[in-house]
Amino acid sequence: MADKPHASGRVKAGDVTQRVGVEQLEKRGIDVDQLIEKLVDAAGAEFTTYYYYTILRMYLAGNEDYKEICEDARLEDRAHFELITPRIYELGGTIPYDIRTFADRAGCPDAYLPGSENGKRPMKNSRDIVTHVKADDILEVLLEAERCAIRTWSEICDITFGKDLRTFDMASRILQEEIEHEAWFIELLSMEREGVARPSGHFRRGDPGDAPYSKNRGFYNP
Amino acid sequence: MELRLPDGRRAHIQVPEGRHILECARDAGVELPSLCEQGWCCTCAVRVLSGRVDQSASRRFYEADRAAGFALICTGSPRSELVLLTHQLEAMRAFRIGANLPVPRGPTLAQP
């Protein structure tokens, strides 16, 4: 114990059952319990998206440029899960102990492979793969997944703006990458399905899944 | 069909064949909550006061939801004349939790 104890306050000196980092959010009007629930839903969506994008990119065979871009989005969604999950614990929360519970409460739908009957297609064995999957159908799944993510992180930004700067900063970084992902998939789907150029305005990432915002690396800005 | 909002307003909208209720409400100037817009998250939940809604386009909608009087208008189309009470996320979430059915747990800003 220090010779001169910390001054008195709502959180007493040495009290490890309270978090000033939470107290200050509540003081500013954040419902921390509700925020944790929202973050768990969002983390669940990033995690399930990472899983489903792993499948989707495999079926972009023959469209190697699409595959690379899907891979960037996949790895960046994983980076989003990695970025936001520690914040859930900092706030005093936890992700579910059962991964099925986590996936079930995800805020966005499962990004199923087209032709997989919403994931329910019977399989004789693990080599019984779906065939004849069209690239534009996959791109549409990817696009709508990104749009759900944009709405989710926009809400979290709104909830935390001016009150919870740390969560806001994380959500804002994630949101920026989700907006880029949407632009990529609009560009690709538009050309693939309609033959119409709708440029995203972006060039390729430096490395696969670079996550220039959510991994806090410098981004391309010549 | 008729939409009843929590503030007492009532809106009458047309939903042509093949379209969903939420998009037609928005076209008519009625702004309602939504998030995933794929019939999954329940943000757009309504109570069906009368009529029947086709939820075949929804990603996750259970027969128990229908039996309890809920619908998801982002991916729902009328199958009859309808009267719907909007902004029912909290009620539908409570139902799903009570029925041990999956549902996201976070709040949405769009609720009154």
Image: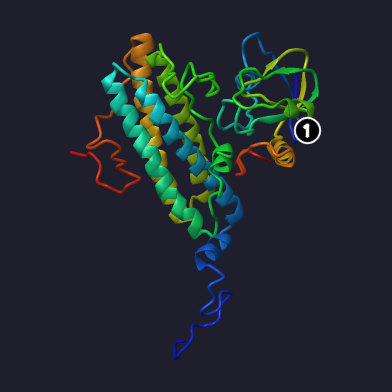
Which residue of the protein is positioned furthest toward the bottom in this rendering? A3
Residue identified by numbered label 1: B8
- Give the structural element (helix, strand or loop) at label 1: loop
Decide if residue A134 is on the left or right side of residue B42. left
Location of residue B4 in the rendering, given as x and y in whole percent from the top left corner: 76, 28
Q: Disc 1 marks which amino acid?
A: Gly
Location of residue A2 in the rendering, given as x and y in whole percent from the top left corner: 44, 87
Read off the chain for label 1.
B
Vertical placement of residue A117 versus B45, above or below: above
* Residue situated in front as seen by the camera: A99 or A211: A99
Q: Quadrant of residue B100?
A: top right
Location of residue A191 in the rendering, given as x and y in whole percent from the top left corner: 33, 14
* Residue situated in front as seen by the camera: B34 or A62: A62
Image quadrant holding the C terminus of chain B, namely: top right
Decide if residue A92 is on the left or right side of residue A220. right
Which residue of the protein is positioned furthest toward the left in this rendering? A222
Q: Is residue A37 visible?
A: yes
Image quadrant holding the N terminus of chain B, namely: top right
Decide if residue B8 is on the left or right side of residue A46. right
Vertical placement of residue A218 versus A17, above or below: above
Decide if residue A199 is on the left or right side of residue A136. left
Q: Is residue A163 visible?
A: no
* Residue situated in front as seen by the camera: B51 or A64: A64
Location of residue A121 in the rendering, given as x and y in whole percent from the top left corner: 53, 19
Residue visible at 39% across and 31% down in the picture: A54
At label 1, counting other C-alpha atoms closer than 10 Å, the crowd grade (few under 14, some 14-19, many 20 or more) is few
Which residue of the protein is positioned furthest toward the right in this rendering? B50
Vertical placement of residue A64 versus B102, above or below: above
Vertical placement of residue A212 versus A192, above or below: below
